[in-house]
Image (tube, rainbow, N blue to C red):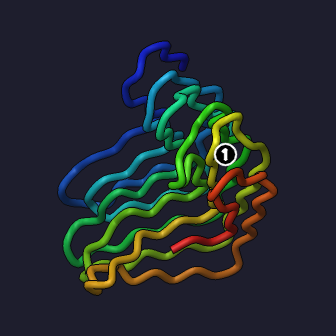
């Protein structure tokens, strides 16, 4: 998928209020956009199972606040659970981004409902690269955190998170960021 515009670009996007959604056995690759956000797999609501996917070569050429994610879990239904396991993610880039917030996230969990459980097991995320922007950050695994305790329960086991990105300015290169 090549999107020359500045809007949202997703490889696979599932968004349903109830039920269990399964996204598995997919090769999601070669997605580029001039805009943001850009993601390989996006899941919102329901109780997703995301496993055995290979996500790579995803990029944004946005010069501002870009966000490139391999897997983005934006929400889970009330009292639901999400399972993200056995995925391989790499070659994500935002080579011209300039922001102190992450421009690249391998697994990006922004779901915050306190009544949900998120299980992240046996994934491999490998990040490299940098940006020509003034500030640049990236995280192999990101989980939204709130001081008001509006956080989903997160359980991580047996993952390999490698972040060899070169942070710039006030940016950070993190294996896990919360």
How packed is label 1: few (under 14 Cα within 10 Å), some, or many (20 or more)? some
Left or right: 164 in relation to 6: right
Residue 163, x across and y down, in percent: 76, 60
Q: Is residue 38 above or below residue 144?
A: above
Residue at which label 1 appears? 54
- Residue at image position (51%, 83%) is 155
Residue 6, x across and y down, in percent: 41, 22
- Residue at image position (54%, 20%) is 1
Q: Nearer the viewer, residue 112 or 134?
A: 134
Q: Nearer the viewer, residue 41 or 32?
A: 32
- Numbered circles on residues, count: 1
Residue 49, x across and y down, in percent: 45, 61
Residue 35, x across and y down, in percent: 45, 27
Left or right: 52 in relation to 82: right
- Residue at image position (32%, 84%) is 147
Q: Nearer the viewer, residue 164 or 64?
A: 64
Q: Is residue 139 above or below residue 156?
A: above
Label 1 SS? strand
Q: Is residue 90 above or below residue 51?
A: above
- Residue at image position (35%, 74%) is 81
Left or right: 72 in relation to 162: left
Q: Is residue 80 above or below residue 106?
A: below
């Amino acid at each position: 998928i090549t999107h020359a515009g500045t809007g949202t670009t997703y490889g696979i996007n599932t968004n349903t209020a109830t039920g269990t959604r399964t996204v598995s056995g997919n090769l999601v690759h070669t997605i580029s956009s001039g805009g943001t956000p850009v993601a390989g797999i996006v899941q919102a609501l329901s109780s997703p199972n995301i496993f055995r996917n290979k996500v790579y070569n995803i990029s944004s050429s946005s010069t501002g606040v870009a966000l490139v994610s391999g897997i983005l879990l934006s929400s889970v239904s009330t009292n639901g659970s999400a399972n993200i396991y056995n995925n391989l993610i790499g070659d994500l880039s935002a080579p011209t981004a300039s922001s102190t917030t992450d421009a690249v996230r391998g697994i990006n969990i922004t779901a915050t409902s306190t009544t949900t459980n998120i299980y992240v097991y046996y994934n491999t995320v490998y990040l490299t690269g940098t940006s020509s922007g003034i500030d640049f950050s990236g995280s192999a695994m990101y989980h939204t955190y709130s001081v008001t305790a509006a956080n989903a329960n997160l359980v991580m086991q047996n993952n390999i998170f490698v972040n060899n990105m070169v942070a710039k300015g006030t940016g950070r290169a993190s294996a896990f960021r919360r």
